[in-house]
Image: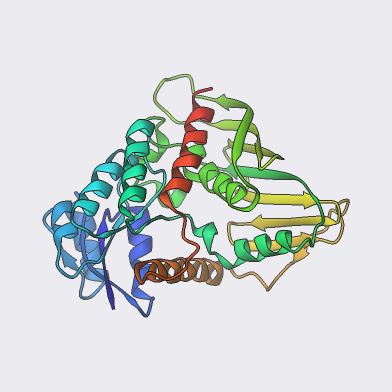
Amino acid sequence: MTGIGIIGLGVMGSRMLRQIDQHPELDAVVAWDPSETSMQQAAGSHSGLALAQSALDVIAHGAVECVYIASPPSSHLSYINLTCDHDKAVFCEKPLSLDLGAAVTTVERIEREGRKAAMNFPHASAPAAVALAEAVQAGRIGSVRDVNVEIVFPQWPESWQVAATWLGYRAEGGFVREVVTHMLFLARRILGPLELTDAEITWPDDAIRAETAADIRLHAGGVPVRVRGRVEDGAQETVHWTISGEHGSLRLFDWYGLEATSDSGAQEWHQANRPYDPASARLAAGQTQLDGLKAMLDGKPHAMARLREGLDVQQMIETILAR
């Protein structure tokens, strides 16, 4: 078993802990969070999990080979560099950092020293996203015409995120950083480098809360990409990533479901790979991500998102938010 240390037991840290518990080759051995309540809840739910006195104690723990960083973005770089100082592998949540200059320095260090490091972009290995990418590469939809992303939330943060209050503030949070980041990562991974055309961001009247709407136009590898997102009370939650070509379209829905149309003009969608069950799809996405993490730690080929990819996407995201 490969030992994983966890920094941050909030929404994402707790989710990852549950996923690691179900993986046959990974073991969450120690964790730390500034909230004593969060640590006690984690220890009560996950037998064998040790509680550390600090993030440094997690990183320095003798049984830890890789450190999963699930703290707020402003702390990511310091934990990444400290983990590298202790010659351990890095698995970090996105966004990489809001300090892009410091992020460049950290990524260059990772690359220069040949460190094992990855970011948690599930679409790098989730079965539906992989099937979509393979279908595009095989020419199933013909020449690619465009990508359209639709994102709607009835509230932000979402109901399951409310404990992470920082997500609702523009300093570090917002759905553009938290959700659009994933959508742009997928476009970059499948189609190529991102180039911004235009962006319109709608902000609340104060200078504190996160955005309420976004209309973003860019290109990925020369292909037009349109992202439209909004927070609207009472609306139905929607997360769609659609790629269209001369012979049809493919769409990721609800993050991990995949649908297709038979031709570019059709409006009826059908299941493209298998019947969709949300719980099973999320579990499968998490487990394939951890399979990739294990492969990286073992020095084997993997599809995990490298920090350079995360940096490229974050540079685009911060450019969009600065418009």
Total labels drawn:
0
* Residue drawn 83% across the image and 58% down it: 268
85 sits left or right of 184 in the view: left
Q: What is the x, y in percent for residue 251?
A: 70, 56
Residue 316 placement, left or right of 246: left
Residue 156 can be seen, yes or no: no
Between 199 and 42, the one lying in front of the other is 199
In the figure, 299 relative to 269: above or below?
A: below
Left of 207 or right of it: where is 30? left
Q: Is residue 28 above or below residue 235?
A: below
Residue placed at 86% from the left, 56% from the top? 247
Front-lying residue, 94 or 165:
94
**Residue 283 x/y as whole percent:** 49, 70
Residue closest to the far front: 112
Q: Who is closer to the viewer here, 55 or 238?
A: 55
For the N terminus, the quadrant is: bottom left
Whether residue 310 is visible: yes
List x then y, in percent, for residue 208. Answer: 39, 25
The image's colour scheme reads: rainbow
Q: Residue at x 19, y 57 (%)?
A: 59
In the rendering, at what x and y percent does residue 207 appear? Answer: 41, 20
Instruction: Residue at 26%, 72% (x, y): give it.
Output: 46
When the figure is inspected, residue 72 is found, relative to residue 98, above or below; the finding is below
**The C terminus, quarter of image:** top right
